[in-house]
Amino acid sequence: MNISRFQDRVRVLDDRSRFLLITVTWLGGYVTAEQAQELGIRDSVPRVHVQLKDLESCGFIKRISSYPAVYQVTKSVARLLGADFSARRQHAIQTIRTRILTVNFYREALRWPVEFVFNHERKLSKFGELGCESGLLPQRGGKPYLWQDFVLQRRSGGLAVAMVDHFGWSAHRQLYRFLKRFARCLGILQDKLRLLEFVNLIWPTSIL
């Protein structure tokens, strides 16, 4: 794919399609047609499917399931964002299910008095503003790592970090690891930091 070809495809994106692609990528890379409608890509079911088909034709998403219709973002979206994301890679079915549930979590959380912080550097900055040094954050390869954590800015001024229960994994073990990763942050920030675990989110029983 040459640059001019990619730029031509980007130019056909309207604001709602761009918002959907970027948001879904940050949430893990998967979305159902129903979720796409609820995220505002189009108002009616027929128009949603037409727009998703157009995005698929342009190479921004690919369909991985027919009923219900499930789509995954492609490397073109990673290029649109200017960074590589695991969202466009191949995943196990359990991970796909979890990431679809993550979109449900996002839709629910939009009703709360919070703002999602997706950009990794902004996440680090938000913790720093509260007095939590980067060395106290969860680490990977000796560097602070919050790429897969959902950080929410609370209107009260504090932060919350949310974890969506991974499909098929032990909830107790996940909670233990979650608390362990942020233990030092909690020790410093105390009431300024809330940890949230979400389980039993609704998803279509027939999916995948």
Image: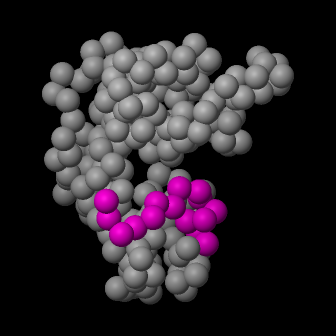
Q: Is residue 109 magenta?
A: no
Q: Nearer the viewer, residue 170 or 103?
A: 103
121 vs 45, left or right, is right
Residue 90, visible in the rendered structure? no
- Tell me what residue is drawn at x 59 percent, y 57 percent: 119
Q: Quadrant of residue 205?
A: top left
Q: Eyeballing the image, is 86 above or below 54?
A: below
Would residue 197 be found to the left or right of residue 2 on screen? Answer: left
Above or below, 204 relative to 174: above
Q: Is residue 142 above or below residue 88?
A: below
Between 114 and 138, the one lying in front of the other is 114
Residue 14: x, y in percent? 61, 33
- Residue 18 percent location from the top left of the image: 58, 37
Q: Which quarter of the rendered picture does the N terminus lie within?
A: top right
Question: How many numbered dots are placed on residues in this image?
Answer: 0
Q: Nearer the viewer, residue 155 or 190?
A: 155
Residue 46, by quadrant, is top left
Span highlighted in magenta in the image: 111-125
- Name the quadrant of the C terminus: top left
Can you give x and y, in whole percent of width and height, for residue 181 in the image?
A: 40, 66
- Residue at the spot 19% in from the left edge and 57% down from the top edge: 172
Q: Residue furthest front?
A: 43
Q: Is residue 107 left or right of residue 188?
A: left
Identified at 36% across, 69% down, the residue is 113
Image side of residue 66 versus residue 30, left or right? left
Q: Colour scheme used in the picture?
A: one colour
Q: Is residue 146 visible?
A: yes
Q: Position of residue 151 (x, y in %)?
A: 45, 63
Residue 128: name its quadrant. Answer: bottom right
Q: Residue at x 54, y 17 (%)?
A: 54
Q: In this rendered view, identify the residue nearer to me: 88 or 140.
A: 88
